[in-house]
Amino acid sequence: MNRWRVIIDTDPGVDDAAAILLALASSEIELLGISVVAGNVGLEASVRNACKLVAVARRPDVPVYAGAARPLVRDQVFGKYANVGAFSDALVPATDVRPRQLSSVRFIADKAREAAASGHKITICAIGPQTNIALALLLHPDVAAGIEQIVVMGGAFSALGHRTAWSEYNVHADPHAADIVWNSGVPLVLFPLDVTMQALFSEEDFRGFEARGGLPGKCLARLLRAYDRSDIARYGRPGGPIHDAMTVAWLVRPELFQGQMTAIGVTVDGPTAGHTWADFYGRSHHAANAMVMKTANEAGFRQLLVERIANLGANITPAGENAA
Amino acid sequence: MEKTRIIIDCDPGIDDAIALLAAFVSPELDILAITTVCGNQPVETTSRNALKICELGARADIPVHAGSHRPLMRAPIRGQFHGETGLGSCVLPEPAKKIEPQRAVEFLIDRLLRAGNERQPITICALGPLTNIAMALRIEPEIARGIERIVMMGGAYREPGNRSMTSEFNVLSDPHAAHIVFSSEVPIVALPLDATHQVILTPAHVKQFEAVSGRISQAVSQLMASWDRNQVERYGSRGGPLHDPLVIGWLIAPHLFETRRVRVFIEYQSELCMGQTIADWFDKSGLNPNTAIVTKVDAAAVIEVFLDRFSRYQDTVMQ
C-alpha cells in the first residue's frame, strides 16, 4: 500500500487534537512530523499540547517542531479559547516529550526539498494559520516542487460569521500566509466551514471515544466536553463540528467527501481582511488552484473517527494516569 | 581597536559593488559574510555578482550565501540603472569562488542566534530589499538578540521616491518585509534618499577614483561611470547618488552624518503610496523611536573618506 507521507501543521486546539490522533491511528499515513504554529493559542501552549498528544498516543517518535510565533504581517489574533492556554493535565496528562530544536519552517522546507529530490512527495495537512507553510515556500524555490498537495482547513464561502462576519479563523489569523500558499502553484484541497459544519459530533460520539479508545479516546472525549463546540442557534440541532479532522479523514477515506475544482483567493488587507472567495461559476480569469470540498458524509466521518480512535487506543490503557 | 562585526545583505547592483569594495579595505570592519537577495536583479545574478566583486577585491575569503528568490508578497521589480548584468558596463571574469551551500536566511538565523548566545551582536548592513532579514526575524524572533543594529539604505522621507512618486526602490521592492523589520524593535539606522541625494558622485569624482584605485581602477571607473544618471535637473549636476556606499560610510565615519531618532512606519496596503516610508517627526503616534534617520551628510568629507579607502587598492595584491 502506498502510504501518504504527511506533515500536520497545526495549532492544537481541540479539533487539531482529533486530527493528530486520527493520523496516528491510520496506517494509510506515515506521519513525518508535527509542525506547530501560533493560532488558537500561543505558540508555547500549542507546542505543549502537540507534545502531550503524541505522548498520549504512545508515539513520542513522531517529532514535534515549534514554528512561527506570530502571523507574517498583521497583528496577532487568537482563537475562542485562547485564555485557556495549554490543555490542563487533568484533560491530557503531562509529558516529558519536548519539541526538537529546529524551527517548523525549516523542517517543512527540508522535508519538501528532500522530497523534490527523491520524488517521494509529501502532503501537508494545514489545520492552523498557514504562516509556517508560507515561510517554508518562500525559503527556497524548490520547496513547492516537493509538496504533492496541501489539505487546508480554512476559509468559508457561505458559512460566514465564525470568527468575524466575513472570515474563518485560520485564514483570518494570517491572510498574507494564506495568499502565499494559495498562489504557490501547489495543488490545494480545501475544507471550508461550509463542509466542516456538515458533520456534528455529540455526546453519543464522545461516549464512543471514551468507551473504546483507551487513554487517547478518554482525552479526546474530555477535550470535546470541556470545550463545548455545539451551537444550536447556528446548526439547528445538537452537536458540534470537528473541523480539522476532516483533512486527515479525506486522506484515508476520500469517498466520504465531494468537491469541485475552482479558483480560490483571499483578501489580505482592508476592513474585510481574511475574506475568502471561490469562483464556483467560472466568472474570473483565474485558473483553478483548489479542490474545494462541498459535501461530507456525516455518518461515515463520525464512524471513521470513532473506529480509528478505538484502534489507536485499544492497547493504551489509562493505567498510567493518576486519575484512572 | 575592536572591529565592528558586520554581515552585508545586498543585491549587487552597481552601488552595492562600490559599497562592498569600500568595506573590503576598511580595517574598522570585520566582514563575517555577504548574503544576497532578489532586488536589482534576480538572486542568481546578485549572488554571482557578489562572488565577482569578492574576487575583484581579493576577498574570496568572505563567504557568500544566496538568499530569498522573491519578495514576501509582491512580484519582483528590477533596478533600472544597473544594466543587464547588474554591474553596468563593468565586465568581470566568471568567478571561481562558489556560493556557500547554506542559504542566506538559514545562515542569518544560525549565525545571529550564536551571536546572541555569545553576547557578540552583529551589525547588519542592508543594501537591498529587506526580505532575508524579515524572513529570519519571523522564523526565529530570538535572532534579534544577536543584532547590534541594522544599518540600511532605503526609504524616502522629505524627498520624493525614486521608483514611484512616493517610494524608494529597496522598500518598494518588499514593503511587507520592511514593515516586519521596522516593527521588530531592532535598532535601525536609515540612510534614505534624503541623505544619499546629498552625495552625488560626479564625473570629476569618478576621475579621482580612477586615479587612486590602483589595480581595480578600471573596474571602479566603469562601475562609477555607469552610475551617471545624466539628470542635472534632479541632482544638480551630472553623476549619480552614492546610495549603498553611505551605509559603509556611516560605519567608518559616523561623525560626518547627522541623524534624528524617530518612529518609522511603512505603507504596505495602498497601491498609490505602496512602500512609502513615514517618519513621525513630531510625535503624533505616541510610539517610541525605532530608527535613527540620517538627515544630513558632509558630502565632501565622505567622498574624501572613500577616496582614501579606494587608494588602499594600490597596495593590496591578488590572493
Image: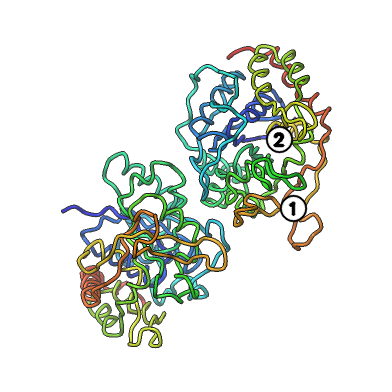
**Label number found at residue A255:** none
The amino acid at mark 2 is Val
Residue B247: which disc?
A: 2
Q: Is residue A88 left or right of residue B16?
A: left
Dot 2: chain letter: B
Q: Which residue is mark 1?
A: B279
A287 w.r.t. B121: above or below? below
Quarter of the image with the C terminus of chain B is top right
Residue B248 picture location, percent across and down: 71, 32
For the N terminus of chain B, which image quadrant?
top right
Classify residue B149 as left or right of residue B101. right
Q: Nearer the viewer, residue B226 or A322?
A: B226
Residue A175: x, y in percent? 49, 61
Front-most of residues A7 and B280: B280
Q: Residues within 10 Å of mark 2 (few under 14, many from 20)?
A: many
What type is the residue that disc 1 sits on? Ala
Of labels 1 and 2, earlier in sequence is 2
Residue B168 falls left or right of residue A249: right
Tag nearer the camera, 1 or 2: 1
- Chain designation of label 1: B
Where residue A28 sits: x, y (%)?
21, 59
Quick check: B257 left or right of B33?
right
Have a look at marks 1 and 2 and say if they share a chain. yes
Does residue B26 show up?
yes
